[in-house]
């Protein structure tokens, strides 16, 4: 990955490691943490040795979800999305990021190392996405009942390919199958007390909770309840009333896309997370509203049914909902000093 705005006074020569100051490290991590994650759990930590040129991305295993994400696939997707944002911010700051995924098999929490160097050959394609990092939010609102243009679909497919993954826009019959799977998952949830309790643990309802929230899904981000329509939007309210929450009619034929990989190992999950965020940022840049629906993928038997047999996709990692409609609102974020550790050299 490349990214540089040219040489500046005081810079090291292109290709040489850049000692990172606290301001730069903080800015990179702030961009990274704007990434989406399952139930906005933000299951990441970052570590930097002062005076060095490397950032570590680590899993925060205290923020796992045994019912929703027993194999930590969702955790890896979120951390991969944060890694991509870091790459974008680095490119926008004139740095090249050399990423190594899972560099130490004895340390399961170390997901990636990112070594940053100066470059005189910027990755302008990455850098241009920097301006929409702060604008990308999950939208749980109705979208218009109109298709995503072919040219935009092709651009999003190419974005997935650039990260070593595959994006498929399923045909009508497969969309129907996916929607059936979501309804199946919703029906199972209603009878799974532990599942519902875990979702409640990651939602914030009422001013007392939302005003103090630094993670989870606040009620102001739930979006309207569904009066009619078939969009696969998880209702985080569950059975709890949310005063003042409106109801709305959602789209009848949602625009869905399947993001998948050839294999299904932790490194594939991280790459899928990077691809997911690249697609979401590019979609935002192209004027699309976006949301993620992992509902039917959280149960193994339904996840296997999500695969599109025509595409030859190996494993579905995420279902994306795209369209034209209201942008989502920002969900709370943990302060950078809660997720970044800077340790003294030596």
Image (cartoon, rainbow, N blue to C red):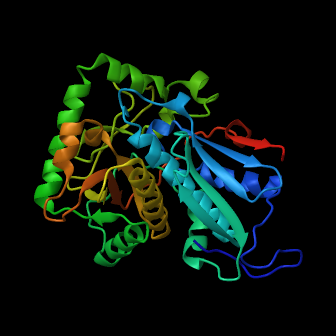
Q: From this viewpoint, is residue 36 visible? A: no
Q: From this viewpoint, is residue 232 visible? A: yes
| Farthest-out residue, left | 173
The relative height of residue 267 versus residue 131 in the rendered view (above or below) is above
Can you say which quadrant of the picture contains the N terminus?
bottom right
The relative height of residue 210 versus residue 121 in the rendered view (above or below) is above
Q: Nearer the viewer, residue 242 or 308?
A: 308
Q: Quadrant of residue 148?
A: bottom left
Can you say which quadrant of the picture contains the C terminus?
top right
The residue under the point 70% across, 36% down is 338
How many marks the image carries: the answer is 0
The residue under the point 41% across, 42% down is 74
Locate residue 61, reporting x and y percent: 53, 32
Q: Nearer the viewer, residue 21 or 224?
A: 21
Locate residue 233, reporting x and y percent: 32, 43
Locate residue 256, reporting x and y percent: 27, 57
Whether residue 2 sits left or right of residue 319 in the image: it is: right
| Farthest-out residue, front | 106
The relative height of residue 300 versus residue 22 in the rendered view (above or below) is above
Q: Quadrant of residue 6?
A: bottom right
The relative height of residue 303 versus residue 243 in the rendered view (above or below) is below
The residue under the point 33% across, 75% down is 154
Locate residue 60, reporting x and y percent: 56, 35
């Amino acid at each position: 990955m490349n990214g540089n705005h040219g040489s500046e006074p005081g810079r090291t020569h292109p290709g040489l490691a850049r000692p990172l100051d606290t301001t730069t490290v903080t800015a990179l991590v702030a961009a990274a943490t704007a990434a989406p994650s399952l139930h906005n759990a933000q299951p990441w930590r970052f570590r930097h040795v002062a005076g060095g040129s490397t950032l570590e991305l680590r899993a925060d295993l205290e923020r796992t979800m045994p019912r929703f994400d027993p194999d930590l696939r969702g955790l890896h997707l979120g951390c991969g999305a944060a890694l991509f944002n870091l790459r974008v911010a680095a490119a926008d700051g004139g740095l090249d990021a050399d990423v190594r995924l899972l560099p130490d098999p004895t340390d399961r929490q170390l997901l990636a190392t990112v070594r940053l160097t100066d470059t005189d050959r910027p990755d302008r394609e990455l850098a241009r996405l920097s301006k929409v990092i702060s604008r990308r939010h999950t939208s749980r609102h109705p979208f218009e009942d109109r298709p995503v243009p072919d040219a935009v679909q092709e651009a999003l497919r190419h974005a997935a390919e650039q990260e070593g993954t595959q994006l498929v826009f399923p045909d009508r019959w497969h969309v129907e199958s996916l929607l059936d799977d979501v309804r199946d998952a919703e029906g199972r949830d209603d009878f799974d007390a532990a599942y519902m309790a875990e979702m409640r643990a990651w939602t914030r309802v009422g001013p007392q909770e939302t005003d103090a929230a630094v993670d989870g899904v606040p009620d102001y981000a739930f979006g309207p309840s569904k009066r009619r329509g078939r969009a696969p939007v998880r209702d985080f309210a569950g059975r709890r009333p949310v005063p003042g929450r409106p109801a709305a009619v959602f789209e009848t034929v949602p625009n869905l896309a399947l993001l998948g990989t050839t294999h299904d190992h932790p490194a594939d999950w991280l790459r899928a997370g990077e691809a997911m965020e690249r697609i979401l940022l590019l979609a935002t840049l192209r004027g699309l509203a976006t949301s993620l629906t992992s509902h039917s993928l959280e149960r193994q038997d339904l996840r296997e049914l999500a695969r599109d047999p025509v595409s030859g996709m190996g494993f579905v990692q995420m279902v994306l909902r795209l369209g034209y409609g209201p942008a989502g609102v920002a969900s709370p974020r943990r302060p950078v000093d809660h997720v970044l550790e800077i340790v003294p050299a030596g």
